[in-house]
Amino acid sequence: MILSKYPRVIQNEIFYNMKYSELLLLSFVSNNMKKLIKSSQMKRFKAMGSIEYDTDRTDQPLVRIHRTDFKEKIIIIIMKILEYETRNDYFQLNVSGMKIDFRLCTEDRDSYRDEKSYPVAVYPKSEKQCVIESIHNYFLDFFGDSVEYVWKMDDDRYKFYIPFIPQLQNLSLCVNLLLGDDFADMENLENFLSSSPVMKSIFMDANTSNREPFNPESKLYQAQSIDIATHEPTFPAFLIHFQGRQAIIDCSICHTSELVQFVNRWKSGEALRMLEYLRISVDMYEIPKTRLLRRIGAKTIDATKQPPVHQMPLIYDWCCLGPNTFPIKSYSYVVRESDNRVASVQIHGLTFSFGVWDKTEEEFLRMMD
């Protein structure tokens, strides 16, 4: 079948019914074919959401497309990148000017709605960076730079290892850290954090009682978002130094005085200037709503009006909860002194939620007129 001989409308219909991995493989045939696919599938590619290199505790990424259809997240594998294996079923393709060996993988991964088959690129150990960089540059040209590209690494060892992080254009870094009771390799972990670019997101499960704390200057606190479970029965120290935009924290106990201190620091403009969303969930003891609202000097929206709902896109969805933060609909709010900006405060049982609006108090109240 020679696609170029078909009318454009037929070509578009054929491409539309092809899987992402099939389109990708077909695009390697020639530059003209790549251009044809790109021009016909531009709208489809822009709706993809993100392309994620998931290393899954290895340095050999599984490349997935993440997209949301009707509020449901769909994850699709489009490629694997592995160190060279001795096989006889390779074929060679030109990728961004570099010849790379490929084979086809036909794993059954219906649980992820993955495509039935996808290409596997292989590299000699000495050419790892070059191969991954060539593939990434091809993605940038083929799918476009409006798609978000994420390098995700996991580590659940008691001794931290320094992972391979390629230097690539338009790439965000997300890190999953599981630090057990016996974790004792803070030096290597801090060295990794200090040498890495500022991270998009960090997910961390940590028992801090048996290890030294993070350096107050650690890049951990500069991540755009953090999602942390800490088993130590104290207020998480992360919020003291956090400089990012979104924080989701699970802890054992959170005392009223500690929440008051957090809100007062935000109100004064002393810290947390970039914060947009915070959710703290505790394991025991309900948060005393009336007492806390009184102590933070919360203001109240007129009971005859409907309060606005604070909700925003999650910077990174670690737990497949959906594309957005949990909605905050509350009659209580506080105001930051330095710029008159408003934050909605919601207290419900074991959960404290804090959503910052990009509005002054006057603008915020006009939303309900």
Image (cartoon, rainbow, N blue to C red):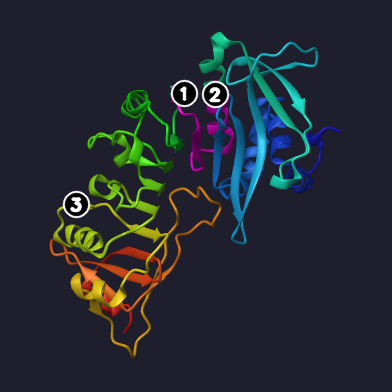
Task: Tell me, yes or no, whether the two marked residues, 1 and 2, touch with CB atoms within 8 Å.
Answer: yes
The residue indicated by pointer 1 is 163
Location of mark 3 (residue): 271
Q: Which sits earlier in the primary sequence, circle 3 or circle 1?
A: 1
In the image, which residues are magenta? Answer: 134-161
For image coordinates 70% across by 36% down, the residue present is: 21
Mark 2 surroundings: few (<14), some (14-19) or many (≥20) residues within 10 A = some
- Kindly report the distance in space between the C-alpha atoms of the residues bearing marks 3 and 2: 37 Å
Instruction: Looking at the picture, tell me which residue is in the foreground, 246 or 254.
Output: 254
The x and y percentages for residue 262 are: 23, 58
Tell me which corner region of the image, top left, top right, bottom left or bottom right, holds residue 27.
Answer: top right
The crowding category of the residue bearing disc 1, from other C-alpha atoms within 10 Å (few below 14, some 14 to 19, many at least 20), is some
Whether residue 29 is in magenta: the answer is: no
Query: Quick one: SS at disc 1?
Result: loop
Where on the picture, by quarter, is residue 251? Answer: bottom left
How crowded pointer 3 is (Cα within 10 Å; few <14, some 14-19, many 20+) is rated as some
Residue drawn 57% across the image and 11% down it: 125
Q: Is residue 277 left or right of residue 54?
A: left
Q: Is residue 95 visible?
A: yes
Q: Residue furthest right?
A: 1
Is 136 part of what is drawn in magenta?
yes
CA distance separating discs 1 and 2: 7 Å
Element assignment for label 3: loop
Establish if 94 lies above or below 113: above
Residue 332, x across and y down, in percent: 29, 76
Q: Earlier in the sequence, mark 1 or mark 2?
A: 2
Q: Which residue is mark 2?
A: 59
Residue type, label 1: Pro
